């Protein structure tokens, strides 16, 4: 190949930047409780079964919120703030409870050979989400999965009562549901910080539908924990306009 041809190829768009990074991720769930939240469930009024949207629905909602947040929508940033707050509470609650039941397990683990609580036939689910917060929720589901499996073992071995088992499952499930419930209610209206400062019609409409912005959001004093920095450039990742002005 001639030197001229090499220079032409190296200067072309194909050689300028590598393609977007892609990866395949999956998760094996061992309990019905975690799988039910991940996959969702249809409503059955006759038997009193409530509808559960499933992670795919929440992932789509979060994608809209996160995209609006990156574009500078203060209401979307407020929603991310609320999700972050609930996530931290849930992570702490689940971690504390897992530690508590592990201590109950350890009381007899030194004398009995108790294997790790795993399903004989776990269900593999694919993880392909567009926002970091969806993955954070999945990590909470992993903890719920581990807690539920451990509780089943503890109940079977009479280390906890059926009543305590039911309460533990109910409390942990409720903790995750509080995060998921926080996602709803966002309206994808086009609002900017200028609209907030000018109290424009767009802003007033957003307030009517979603509520008044907290002071730190209205004054642009809050940045989401996982908000990308403008200076960060990672070769291979798709370009995304981010705004935090």
Image: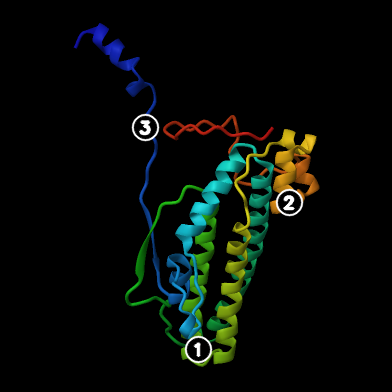
The residue closer to the viewer here, 126 or 119, is 126
| First along the sequence among labels 3 and 2 | 3
Disc 2 versus disc 1: nearer the observer: 2
Disc 1 versus disc 3: nearer the observer: 3
| First along the sequence among labels 1 and 3 | 3
| First along the sequence among labels 2 and 1 | 1
Disc 3 versus disc 2: nearer the observer: 2
Mark 3 secondary-structure assignment: loop
Tag 3 near tag 2, CB within 8 Å:
no
Q: Which residue is mark 2?
A: 208
CA distance separating discs 2 and 1? 49 Å
Per the rendering, the mark at residue 72 is: none
User: How many marks can you see?
Assistant: 3
Q: Is residue 227 visible?
A: no
Mark 2 secondary-structure assignment: helix
CA distance separating discs 1 and 3? 51 Å
Say above or below: 171 vs 4: below
Q: Which residue is mark 1?
A: 155
Say above or below: 87 vs 192: below
Give the left or right position of residue 47, taking residue 16 as reference: right
Report the residue at 33% width, 77% height from top: 120
Instruction: Please tell me how crowded label 1 is: few (under 14), some (14-19), or many (20+) other residues with Cα within 10 Å.
Output: some
Image location of residue 137, percent across then percent down: 54, 60
Q: Which residue is mark 3?
A: 19
Say above or below: 43 vs 14: below
The residue closer to the viewer here, 56 or 44, is 44
The residue closer to the viewer here, 42 or 7, is 42
Report the residue at 48% width, 58% height from top: 57
């Amino acid at each position: 190949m001639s030197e001229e041809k090499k220079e032409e190829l190296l200067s072309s768009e194909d050689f300028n930047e590598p393609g977007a990074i892609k990866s395949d991720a999956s998760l094996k769930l061992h309990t019905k409780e975690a799988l039910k939240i991940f996959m969702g469930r249809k409503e059955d009024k006759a038997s009193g079964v409530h509808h559960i949207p499933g992670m795919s629905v929440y992932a789509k909602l979060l994608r809209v919120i996160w995209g609006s947040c990156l574009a500078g929508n203060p209401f979307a940033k407020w929603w991310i703030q609320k999700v972050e707050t609930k996530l931290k509470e849930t992570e702490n609650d689940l971690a504390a409870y897992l530690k508590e039941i592990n201590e109950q397990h350890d009381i007899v683990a030194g004398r009995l050979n108790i294997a790790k609580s795993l399903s004989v036939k776990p269900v593999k689910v694919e993880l392909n989400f567009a926002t970091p917060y969806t993955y954070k929720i999945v990590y909470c589901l992993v903890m719920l999965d581990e807690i539920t499996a451990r509780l089943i073992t503890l109940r079977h071995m009479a280390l906890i009562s059926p009543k305590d088992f039911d309460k533990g499952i109910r409390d942990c499930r409720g903790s995750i549901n509080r995060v998921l419930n926080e996602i709803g209610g966002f309206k994808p209206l086009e609002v900017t910080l200028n609209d907030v400062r000018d109290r424009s019609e767009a802003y007033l409409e957003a307030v009517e539908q979603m509520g008044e912005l907290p002071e730190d959001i209205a004054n642009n004093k809050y940045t989401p924990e996982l908000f990308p920095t403008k200076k960060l450039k990672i070769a291979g990742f798709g370009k995304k306009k981010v705004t935090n002005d």
